[in-house]
Amino acid sequence: MDNAQLGAGSTVAIIGGGQAGGEAATLLRQNRFEGRIVLIGEEPCLPYMRPPLSKAFLAREIAKDALIYKAAAAYENARVEMRLNARVDEIDRQDKRLILNDGATFGYDRLVIATGGRARQLPVPGASSSNILYLRTIADVELLQPLMQAGRRLVIVGGGYVGLEVAAIAVKLYDRGPIFFRQERVGRDGQLFPVYKLRTMVPNAEDMLPELREESRNEMLAFFD
Ligand SMILES: Cc1cc2nc3c(=O)[nH]c(=O)nc-3n(C[C@H](O)[C@H](O)[C@H](O)COP(=O)(O)OP(=O)(O)OC[C@H]3O[C@@H](n4cnc5c(N)ncnc54)[C@H](O)[C@@H]3O)c2cc1C
């Protein structure tokens, strides 16, 4: 961003309260931008580290506060206006205005879009059932944690890092299978990640979903991607 053209009367709006948005906000100030900085984030909390969500935080080894790597004072000192729990629904580029989910509008001179990623929703009937969860946010983990207990069954779809990390914690917390993965990366024979003691590998778990849902009416299905 060309700060030279941005005077003290200018506003930079940042959409997204993840690490990218939070860093952009404070770095702008460190780089001597003197105007108004507004960060609009959909989640209710300050920018936090997502990596521990599928590791120490899921395993309850660290508390929520430990995920927040920069305290509120850092944003206050940098004179960043935090509009948390607010979603930008529309960008009016013509008038340089943001329209928030509560109807509020915000004028800007420059816009930073740091909206990150989302978990891909599972495209199968019944995927909106309350026992089908995704893992992307603190709120997602808080829904999942109480379900991760002995006697329940966890099915994971998505054999990337996040799925594998959750599997490792599940095995640690309650050594019970089966755990299914969808992606080839895991290996059909279960040899690639023997440390996780995965008992069953099914590359195309979607095909089994109706049967699994029927079978596990009172149990948990968790899908991550
Ligand atoms: C469980 C998990 C484990 C991970 N582990 C690792 C790891 O071990 N190592 C690693 O390098 N990376 C890891 N990652 C990836 C890493 O966390 C991401 O790359 C990083 O979060 C990206 O940061 P970001 O700020 O760009 O986006 P995000 O963290 O996705 O933040 C974007 C923010 O924008 C908000 N937002 C979106 N749309 C709007 C809108 N319209 N209005 C307002 N706000 C909006 C979202 O709610 C979100 O808070 C992990 C991710 C997850 C989910």
Image (cartoon, rainbow, N blue to C red):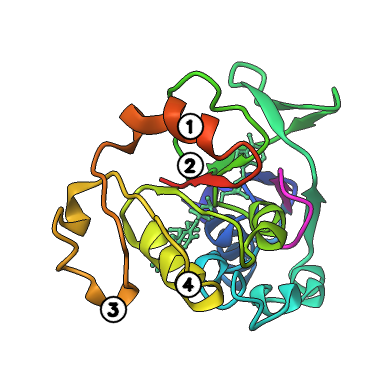
Residue 40 in magenta?
Answer: yes
* Label 1 – label 3 distance at C-alpha: 28 Å
Q: Is mark 3 on a helix, strand or loop?
A: helix
**Residue lying farthest to the bottom in this orientation:** 61
Would you say 152 lies left or right of 72 here? left
Q: What element carries label 1?
A: loop
**Residue at disc 1, CB closer than 8 Å to ligand 1:** no
The residue under label 2 is 119
* Label 3 – label 4 distance at C-alpha: 13 Å
**Residue at disc 2, CB closer than 8 Å to ligand 1:** yes
Residue at screen point 54% across, 72% down: 174
Q: Is mark 4 on a helix, strand or loop?
A: loop
For the residues labelled 2 and 1, say whether their Cβ atoms are less than 8 Å apart: yes
Q: Is mark 2 on a helix, strand or loop?
A: loop
**Where are the magenta residues, as a range?**
37-46
Looking at the rendered image, the disc whose residue lies closer to the viewer, 3 or 2, is 3
Closer-to-camera residue (138/32): 138
The residue under label 4 is 175
Earlier in the chain: of badge 1 and badge 3, it is 1
Earlier in the chain: of badge 1 and badge 4, it is 1
The residue under label 3 is 195
Amino acid type at image mark 4: Asp
Q: How crowded is mark 2: few (under 14 residues within 10 Å), some or many (20 or more)?
A: few
User: Where in the figure is residue 58, as x and y percent of width and height?
Assistant: 60, 69
